[in-house]
Amino acid sequence: MTASESEPESAAEQRIREWAHAHREPLAQYLLELVELETPTENPETFDDFFERLASDLRDSGLETERVPGEETGGRLEAWTPGRDDADEIQLVIGHADTVWPLGTVDENPPEIRDGVLEGPGALDMKGGLTQAAFALRALDELSLEPSLPVHVLISSDEEIGSPESKPRIIELAKQANRVFVLEPASGPEGKIKTARKAVGHFTVTIEGKAAHAGLEPEEGASATEELGTVIHRLHELTDIDSGITVNVGQVEAGLRSNVVAPDARAEVDVRAPTDDAAEAVAEEIRSLEATTPGTELTIDGGFGRPPMEPTAGNRLLWERVQTLGDRLGLTLEGTRSGGASDGNDASRHAPTIDGFGAVGDGAHQTYEYVQLDALVDRVALLAACLHDEPLSTDSQP
């Protein structure tokens, strides 16, 4: 049964909105409990209890679940509408359970609720988004509102390190999806939804020189450090803020000691670009760099690991649909481009995708990380309304 067949326009949204606001306190308590269950990316064993908690709650909302173990990570949790294998399309909800905070952070910085916010490590990025998904699906179940397409939820444990194990599965599911909702935090305390993201690249520059005594025979050496300085300058010149390209040499190491001409040097480089063409162009410029310091050799490895999430026709159509539903719920939604990357970058290559669809707050990866609880209520209603809404037309696919 589709949304238009089940209830008049806006009637379902009104019921969803009322349900979400009536559950504000349980919502806050649920998020608090998820934050208290620490799940650092580098501690795979911590995901057992966390995923079992989420799986139980998703089963209570009528979904089937499977815990998929990882090889070097905590694996992933998947949940789906029963009978989804008989459907031609799905709608995909993507989240991640891993955080950047080491074990023991919760003891040092206990989460707390005060002044309309929940502050705590991992609250915004992204246990707020996981809370949103659990309650949106619970709302639809308790209100007897059928999603317009089978829902498939994937929650990974490796997003913070680039999704090395979960990415193939995300792409596989995105290829089956009519639309994708990525529950990364919204942009800033204003809660802007991420309608585009930059491509992200990582390059390693290695320089080989020749050691020599810096006081006795410096002319016999070839300084890798000197060449590194030149290379850093040339790399940073590739930044073009107006076009959205940024190049940052974030980590360097060089030499043996101050009285030795440096025989080697190394730099780690972060690169962001707004489009495929821009990414390809800046990558070519980086790879074309050649050593200019006599006696040194330059090697460049790496490339772009996350493609851009561009404002494709399908992405624009999904964004327009989300804005319309937001209006029905009394929400004014704004979109923005993000310089960061997520699983949405990969999913958007295969299906209309919207990102930053999760919690509203500030301080992701920082000690003051927090979630605005009133906004989280609204985002629960928004996700539930989106999952209930009509599918996108088939010609909207990328």
Image: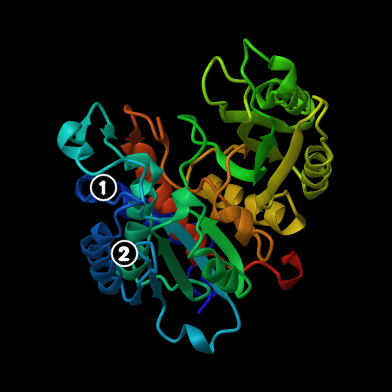
Q: Residue at x 56, y 62 (%)?
A: 180
Q: Amino acid at mark 1?
A: Leu
- Kindly identify which numbered label has been placed on residue 135: none
Give left or right: position of 200 versus 147: right
* Residue that carries the numbered disc 1 in the rendered image: 31
- Asked whether the viewer can see residue 66, the reply is yes
Q: Residue at x 82, y 26 (%)?
A: 294
Q: Earlier in the sequence, mark 1 or mark 2?
A: 1
Q: Quadrant of residue 61?
A: bottom left
- The foreground one among 92 and 301 is 301
* Residue that carries the numbered disc 2 in the rendered image: 138
The image position of residue 318, as x and y in percent, is 64, 56
The image position of residue 35, as x and y in percent, is 25, 46
Q: How is the image coloured?
A: rainbow
Nearest-to-viewer mark from 1 and 2: 1
Q: From this view, report whether residue 156 is shown above or below residue 2.
A: above
